[in-house]
């Protein structure tokens, strides 16, 4: 287990409960980004749905100068390759700017560089650093915006496919704290529009963005019950709401996926046990839900 040490060159930032809330959001984006590609890459042909494409396919890489429309008040470090993660992004219905990046720098170095840039603009920040992962958080008291950077080492055998060969990947986010006017009411409650939530579910954050063809959503829930209980629940509950179940996929003895279509949308669900609880009565299942628009070609046009 990685031991994190707090590095607080500028104190009196925010209460730790607020700090770790945004660490959690940052880790949520990391997990969703990884599972997002995992679900689509293994469950179907990537040409079927827009959301299955990599960020490089959906949005042109903008190199080291920063993405178009990224707030100039919060510059990004040099020496990183930036890839936007979507437009009109919201976390639980509240607007945010989020980008992914790749770099040859170490996790500690790139986080330190970002903190230096924040400090130059009079912002206070705090960081938690380990040998393979680091997170920095800052707060702009004038605009009430919260800023986060999380960087992590990519396993060597995955670097060619995930990070363009670079050893370190990460995300930078600006949380505006205002409602995104395209967000649906369900998002503020930690739910995805049109997707049922099991009773007793521990809901987290809903990440949404405007992509080609419509809005896409990602959420992770911790549900009661075994993996089998959850697979059967969603097969029935989603069908009752008009979703058509496609062929479920067994990715391993402990991981399952389900894919549903409804209208111009696709829902991909990934199920994995949490290994919490010693009996079926205490079992919990981690359920990742991704809803995204299907491409025009998959709606009946040329394939």
Image: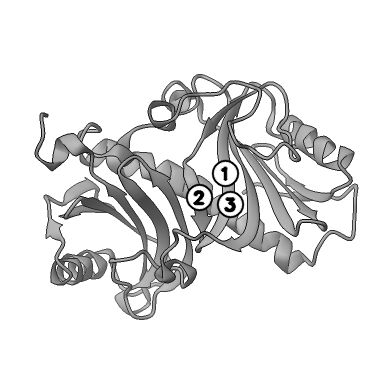
Quadrant in the picture for residue 234 = bottom left
Which disc, if any, is residue 96? 3
Which disc, if any, is residue 98? 1
State the residue in front, 153 or 64. 64
* Position of 135 relative to 163 (above/below): below
Cα separation, mark 1 vs mark 2, equals 7 Å
Relative image position of residue 79 (x, y in whole percent) = 69, 21
Relative image position of residue 167 (x, y in whole percent) = 58, 24
Q: Are marks 1 and 3 in contact (CB under 8 Å)?
A: yes
Cα separation, mark 1 vs mark 3, equals 6 Å
Name the N-terminal-most of marks 2 and 3.
2
Residue in view at x 82 percent, y 50 percent: 125
Residue in view at x 29 percent, y 40 percent: 40
Name the N-terminal-most of marks 1 and 2.
2
Q: Is residue 173 visible?
A: yes
Q: Are marks 1 and 2 in contact (CB under 8 Å)?
A: yes
Q: Secondary structure at mark 3?
A: strand
Q: Are marks 2 and 3 in contact (CB under 8 Å)?
A: yes
Q: Secondary structure at mark 2?
A: strand
């Amino acid at each position: 287990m990685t031991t994190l040490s707090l590095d607080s060159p500028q104190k009196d930032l925010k209460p730790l409960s607020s700090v770790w809330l945004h660490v959690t959001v940052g880790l949520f984006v990391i997990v969703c980004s990884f599972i997002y590609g995992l679900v689509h890459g293994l469950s179907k042909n990537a040409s079927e749905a827009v959301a299955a494409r990599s960020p490089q396919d959906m949005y042109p890489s903008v190199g080291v100068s920063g993405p178009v429309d990224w707030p100039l008040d919060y510059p990004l470090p040099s020496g990183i390759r930036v890839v936007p993660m979507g437009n009109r992004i919201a976390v639980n219905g509240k607007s945010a700017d989020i980008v992914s990046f790749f770099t040859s720098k170490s996790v500690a170095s790139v986080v330190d560089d970002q903190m230096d840039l924040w400090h130059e603009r009079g912002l206070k920040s705090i960081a938690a650093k380990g040998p393979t992962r680091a997170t920095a958080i800052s707060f702009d008291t004038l605009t009430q915006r919260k800023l986060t950077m999380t960087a992590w080492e990519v396993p060597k055998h995955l670097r060619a496919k995930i990070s363009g060969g670079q050893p370190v990947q990460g995300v930078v986010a600006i949380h505006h704290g205002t409602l995104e006017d395209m967000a649906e009411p369900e998002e503020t409650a930690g739910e995805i529009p049109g997707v049922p939530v099991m009773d007793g579910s521990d809901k987290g954050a809903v990440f949404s963005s405007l992509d080609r063809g419509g809005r896409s959503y990602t959420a992770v829930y911790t549900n009661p019950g075994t993996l089998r209980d959850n697979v059967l629940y969603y097969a029935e509950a989603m069908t009752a709401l008009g979703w058509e179940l496609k062929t479920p996929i067994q990715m391993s003895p402990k991981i399952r996926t389900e894919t549903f279509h409804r209208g111009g949308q696709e829902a991909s669900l990934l199920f994995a046990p949490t290994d919490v609880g010693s009996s079926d009565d205490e079992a919990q299942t981690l359920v990742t839900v991704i809803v995204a628009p299907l491409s025009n070609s998959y709606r009946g046009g040329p394939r």
